[in-house]
Amino acid sequence: MTQLTPEQTAAFERALSRLSPADRACVNELKDAAARAAAEVAPHWDFELAARTVDGLLGEGANDDQRRGLIAVWALELPGRIAAERLPQAVLAGYPTYVDRLAAYLDSGADPYDPDFWAKDVRVSLALSVPGSNTQMLDLSSPVGPGLVVRHMLGGRGPGPLIAWVRAGGWSPWLETHTEARDLSDFNEAGWERNWAAAAALLKTRPELAGVIGSSWFFDPPLETISPRLTYLRTTPVNNGAFMIHQGGGEIHDERASASSPTRRAMIEAGEYSACSWLLCWPRKPLIRWAEARGLLQP
């Protein structure tokens, strides 16, 4: 993506034109410092930390107009950031959809600015996270510390993930995938295949990365019988070299698991199922091998 379309540019400029003079001055004053601060904390495991860091710079009087203004000015600068990252074509192909979605959301003037969307938009507009598919974005750097792997083993689940983590060079940074709730059109087997292929393409150009990770309740093994249509989410990676680390259960995972399924909701309410989050880790070599075998990587 070398430039924005006239329609995209106009949408971002409209978002800026709606700002009060005071808010526009705030955005102009903070945009560079906030971008640097967000980039500095982006590799942290906490996906929302970049957005919270920007909020901290905005201060107690922060408002959603200022947030929209920052995203708009960063989006206008996005082609330069994309070029600097030297991204593979499998990732670049996703940008027209991502930028259109970002422009439409800012143009809508949604109030309040959904905190999850704000966290994602900070990362996307600063090229800290990049397209994997229409529904999945990929953080360019995320850690998998040894503590989580050791706790998995001490919980009686075996040493396999620890051994796999060491073999993968797991102390190095990983890509991490996140779901974009504003567009679930690719939340299917073909869409996830595109996401994994984009991750493989990135890994081929970035040997310093250990692989790609994802953290969710939908990797929970009992779903193979409870929600068999979701089985591919776990089995495609695990059958092709990925390993999983148990992260535990909790109310938030039950809430998310029950949100889109009456079956899961009924089982959770009856005490027949409690959702657990798992960290899925797909190391670089087996992921690239899988993508190449399926003809998903461009030469």
Image (cartoon, rainbow, N blue to C red):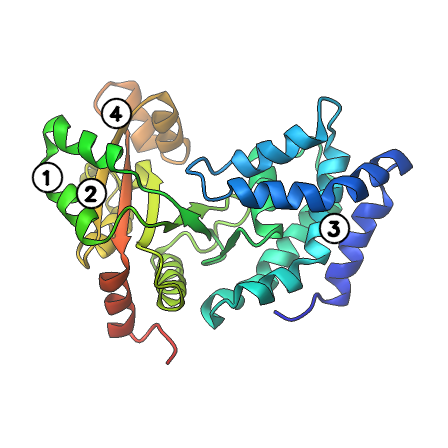
Residue 232: x, y in percent?
A: 26, 52
State yes or no: discs 4 and 2 in contact (Cβ < 8 Å). Answer: no
Amino acid identity at mark 4? Ser
Q: Residue 251 is drawn in which quadrant? A: top left
Callout 4: 10 Å neighbours few (<14), some, many (20+)? many
Callout 1: 10 Å neighbours few (<14), some, many (20+)? few
Q: Earlier in the sequence, mark 3 or mark 4?
A: 3
Q: Look at the image and tell me whether residue 221 can be seen.
A: yes
Separation of residues labelled 3 and 2 (CA atoms): 45 Å
Residue designated by label 2: 224
Look at 36% across and 43% down and name the residue there. 143
State yes or no: discs 1 and 2 in contact (Cβ < 8 Å). Answer: no
Foreground of the two, 214 or 188:
214
Separation of residues labelled 3 and 4 (CA atoms): 43 Å
State yes or no: discs 1 and 4 in contact (Cβ < 8 Å). Answer: no
Residue designated by label 1: 159
| Mark closer to the observer (3, 2) | 3
Foreground of the two, 260 or 84:
84
Label 2, secondary structure: give it.
Answer: helix
Furthest toward the right, the residue is 21
Amino acid identity at mark 2? Glu
Residue designated by label 4: 274
Separation of residues labelled 1 and 3 (CA atoms): 48 Å
Residue 139: x, y in percent?
A: 46, 50
Label 1, secondary structure: give it.
Answer: loop
Residue designated by label 3: 73
Residue 87: x, y in percent?
A: 50, 67
Q: Say left or right for 78 vs 207.
A: right
Question: Which label is found at residue 109?
Answer: none
Callout 2: 10 Å neighbours few (<14), some, many (20+)? some
